[in-house]
Image: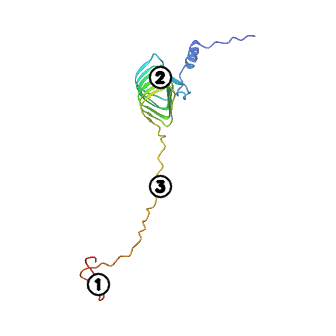
Amino acid sequence: MFEKRNPKPESNRQQASQDSFTAPATPPANSGRAAVIGPGIKINGDITGDENLIVEGKVTGKINLASHQVDIGQTGQVNADISAKIIKIAGEVRGDLTGTEKVVISRSGNVHGNIVAPRMTLEDGAIFKGSIDMDPGEPEKPVVSKPPVKKVVAKTEEKPKVTTSEKPKQGAAYSLNGG
């Protein structure tokens, strides 16, 4: 009436549990999450990558996340040049900032460095020392060359010149002294 089933051998169970924990062969697409450097972390070196970054600790070097966002939190202390799509500063930064979309310095932000970005927000109370270049980066329009303009010169009548080799006409009086 009841049939007895044979359980899977132990080796098959272990294999199944190992398969369920293996990492995928391809890395997952950017999920919109960000890497975080916590307040107790210090990094000396260059940071590059393909995801957003939040810095709450200390970073010395360079940060290059060209197509992503970099946030420097209130406890963040960065001594580095930062290049990213969007840069938001609430902590302290010593270095040049290059944002391809925009740079925002909040009221608690402190930046000493030059900024290059098409859009810039400096909130009331923020500390900033440096220069700002807000060139939108649009390619220059080609200069259309126009055909050269021809100058029109009016011709005037020339007065006859008198030279000493000419013989005076009869009845005409010439003066070489202008008189």
Q: Which mark is residue 144?
A: 3
**Pick the front one: 165 or 85:** 165
Nearer to us in this view, 36 or 139? 139
Residue type, label 2:
Gly
Query: Image quarter for residue 42?
Result: top left
Sequence order check: which comes first, mark 3 or mark 1? 3
Task: Determine whether, in the image, residue 122 is placed left or right of residue 45.
Answer: right
- Residue topped by disc 1: 173
Q: Residue furthest right?
A: 1
Q: Residue at x 43, y 23 (%)?
A: 78
Q: Of the two numbered discs 1 and 2 on the same chain, state the one appearing first in sequence.
A: 2
Q: Amino acid at mark 3?
A: Val
| Mark sitting earlier along the chain (2/3) | 2
Amino acid type, residue under disc 1 in the picture = Ala
Measured in 3D between alpha carbons, the distance from the residue under mark 1 to the one under mark 2, in whole angstroms, is 99 Å
Q: Residue drawn at (49%, 21%), measured in percent from left and top?
A: 74
Residue under circle 2?
91
